[in-house]
Structures are given as structure tokens and as C-alpha cells.
Amino acid sequence: RSQNTKFKYLCEHKNKKLMNNQFTYPKEKIRFAILTFFFAQGLCMASWASRIPDFKDVFAANYAFYWGLILFMIPVGKFVAIPLAGYLVSRLGSRTMVQVSILGYAISLLCVGLAHEVYLLGFLLFGFGVFWNLCDISFNTQGIEVERLYGKTIMATFHGGWSLGACTGALIGFVMIWLGVAPVWHYMLISAIILLIVLAGRKYLQEATLREDEESLPNSGTASQVEVETPNVFRLLFRKPEILLLQLGLVGLFALIVESAMFDWSAVYFESVVNVPKSLQIGFLVFMVMMAAGRFLTNYAYQLWGKKKVLQLAGSLICIGFFISALLGNTFESMAMKVIINSLGFMLVGLGISCIVPTLYSFVGAKSKTPVSIALTILSSISFIGSLVAPLLIGAITQAFDIRIAYMIIGILGGCIVLIVSFCNAFDIREENKL
């Protein structure tokens, strides 16, 4: 009993100590600072994606499946980093890992710009994927901590910040292409911006706090057990996950296939199918603009329809958008009509995919009984299978048939999302859980 009392005291003392910066700084400033880190991650990702056609041309990767293998190195890096991310966030804390991961992400982007041969590019893209996943886990852990601070669902706004950063990155990339700036100078500018964001926002980062259901630890608690969850990390990672996480993960898997199809192939689609000049390759840009707009509107959509209906609508928009682009995008002779139709399809896909990932993370924070960083790692483990499958799937279908066929197959996954959300009980949520 005395050991339990001492352990409980240490837990309370740790939580009080770790939450000191919540009382030092207004929660609005904390929220904005976390938002800027999400912005930085989106900026970095879009800076890479906007220059993919340039790398494809430089390395003469005209064979679609071969280029798919090169892009495959990013999700391989993300997948390999999954257990590492869960361990490091639990061991070092998300506060430290946010700073390490975003700086590593920026440095790896700069190194990609310096790549001079294809094998080196593949290796650097692997590292880019590793830091991408470290950012995902640590940033979303921070977002859930701020949600607890606010006592309401605000995760979608953080992902909106990510999308806003991606829009900015896509716009900067478009300007850099138009001006003929080499990727390395472009990426050097992006890395400098990210460094300034880290320096300005690092003091507002939060440490994980223990919830009541996470304080049920063994009787022989000691100070070292209070400091970190490390002894239990791998046991939690490899035990049978909650059914909730499996159901959420399946939707996340389909969503990441859709995201990969747009992040890695939208610029290639406009170049090879629509056959537009570089000055009109706006597919990735309009997709990211609508993705950002959708994420900032997600909380309002929760109020109107609830999370389940929002996900059903999202899957429908994804399906419709891909089929509009694939079936109607090349039926007109006019270049202007081709650009308009394909842009409309990409906009619908962007609006649909915008709310899926933040809604899944919000479900984890609200319903999962697993510690947050571990739950996010398990969810990512399932979802990232989609990232692994997408480059090879799209590359193989494009090589065998056409990228439009690949896009129609990806569109069917939007319908699958609607079915899963409609019939799985993980998505049944009471009205009081709406904002």
C-alpha cells in the first residue's frame, strides 16, 4: 500500500511538472505553435512532391513501374520507422522528438535535392520516409495533448495547418518551376523556413500527461517507471490490438493509398495524360488547396452531420472525384476544358481525403484505451500498408494499362471507405461527442 501511495504521488508530481508550460503560456499560443509545426511538415512534403516530375526527367525514369520502385522507398522508410517512432516518442517524449524529426525531415529533403544518381536518390528517399513517420507520430501525439488541454476535438485544425503548409509548398514549388530554379536551391529555402519555425515554437511544445486509465501500473512502481513507458512499449506494440484500432486502421490504409496516388502521381498525371505545359500543371496545387480548405471546415462539418456521416461523405467524394478525372478528363479537345475537368476531379478528391486522417486520430484520442503514442503507432502500422502498396500498385497498373485505369481502381477504394464506416461499430459515436 505504501508503494502504491508513493507511486501515485510520483505520477501526480510528474504530471504537474510536465504541465508547467501549460500554465506558463496561454493555451491559444500553445495551439498556434503546434499548428506551425504541422505547417512545417506539410511544407516539406509538398516541396518534394511538387518537384517529382523534375526528378523523373533528370533520372530518365520513363518506365512507370521503375519509377514506382523509386517512390516505393519512401513508404518503406515510413514502415521501417514505425516501431522506432513508437519507442522514441515513449522513451524521449514527443516534445524532443518533434524537434528532432522535423529538423531531420528538412535535412533529408535538402539531401534529396543534392542526389546525383538514382541509387543515392532511393537511399535518401528511404531516410525521408523515416523522418516523415517520426514527424507523424510525434506531431499527432502533441495534437492529442493539446486536445486534452482544450477538452474538445481540434485535431482537424492541426491537420488543416499541415494542408496549409502543403498548399504553400505546392505554390512555392510551382513558382520555382516557372522560374527555373534548381531543386537544391528550392529545398535550401524550405529548410531555412523550417529552422525558423522550430526556433520560434519549440518552447510551447507539450510533454505527455498520464490519464487516469494509464495510471493503473504494477504495484512495485519506482521513479524510473514513472519517467518513461519504455519497459512496456514493445509488449504493447506487438500484443493483439484493440478491434477499434483494426477498424480505424483499415480506413486509414485505404486513405493512404488515395493520398499516395495524389502526392506522388498527380503531377505525373497532368504531364502524361492531360499533356499540359509546365505552366498549367496545377493538379497537385488544386488538390492541396481543397485538402487544406476541407480540414479547416471539418470541425464545422462535425457539428452539422457528426463524424460518421462526414467520413461517409468523404469516401463518396473520393470515388466521384477519381472517376470524373479518369473518365471525363481527356474527352475534350480544348486544353482549357481538360485542365478544368481534371482540376474539378482533383478538388473533389482533396476535399474528400481532407477529413479522414484527422478524424481517425481524433477517434484514437477519444475512444482508445491504449496509451496515445502506442495507439497511434499501431494505427500507423496498419495504415502504412497502404503507403507500401500504392507506388507499386499504381506503377504496375499504369505500365500494364494506363494511369487513368489506376485512378479508377483507387477511386473504388473511396466506396470501400463508405461501406466500412457504415457497417463497423468503431464509427458509431454518440451525439454528445460532436462539437
Image (cartoon, rainbow, N blue to C red):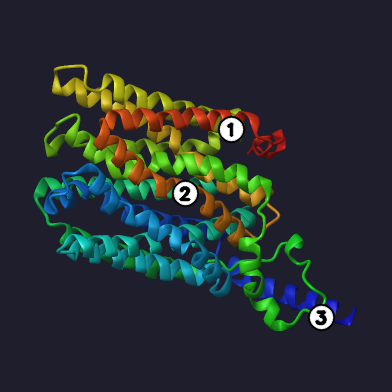
What x and y, as percent, mark residue 83?
Answer: 52, 64
Q: Is residue 207 above or below residue 362?
A: below
What residue is shown at x 65% (from left), y 75% (from top)? 231
What residue is shown at x 14% (from left), y 64% (from top)? 116
Q: Amino acid at mark 3?
A: Lys
What x and y, as percent, mark residue 298?
Answer: 51, 37
Q: Nearer the viewer, residue 212 or 237?
A: 237
Q: Which residue corresponds to mark 2? A: 385
Q: Which residue corresponds to mark 1? A: 420
The answer to whether residue 398 is left or right of residue 379 is left
Image quadrant of residue 248? top right
Q: Which residue corresponds to mark 3? A: 6
Report the Cα–Cα distance between label 2 and label 3: 43 Å
Q: Amino acid at mark 1?
A: Ile
Of marks 2 and 3, the one in the foreground: 2
Structural crowding at the residue carrying mark 3, measured as other residues with C-alpha within 10 Å and reported as few (<14), some (14–19) or many (≥20): some
Q: Is residue 298 above or below residue 343?
A: below
Of marks 3 and 1, the one in the foreground: 1
Q: Amino acid at mark 2?
A: Ile
Image quadrant of residue 178? top left
Where is the C terminus found, in terms of image quarters? Answer: top right
What residue is shown at x 65% (from left), y 63% (from top)? 236
Mark earlier in primary sequence (2, 1): 2
Query: Circle 1 sits in a helix, a strand or a loop, which is it?
Result: helix
Q: Most extreme residue toward the left, as rendered? A: 180
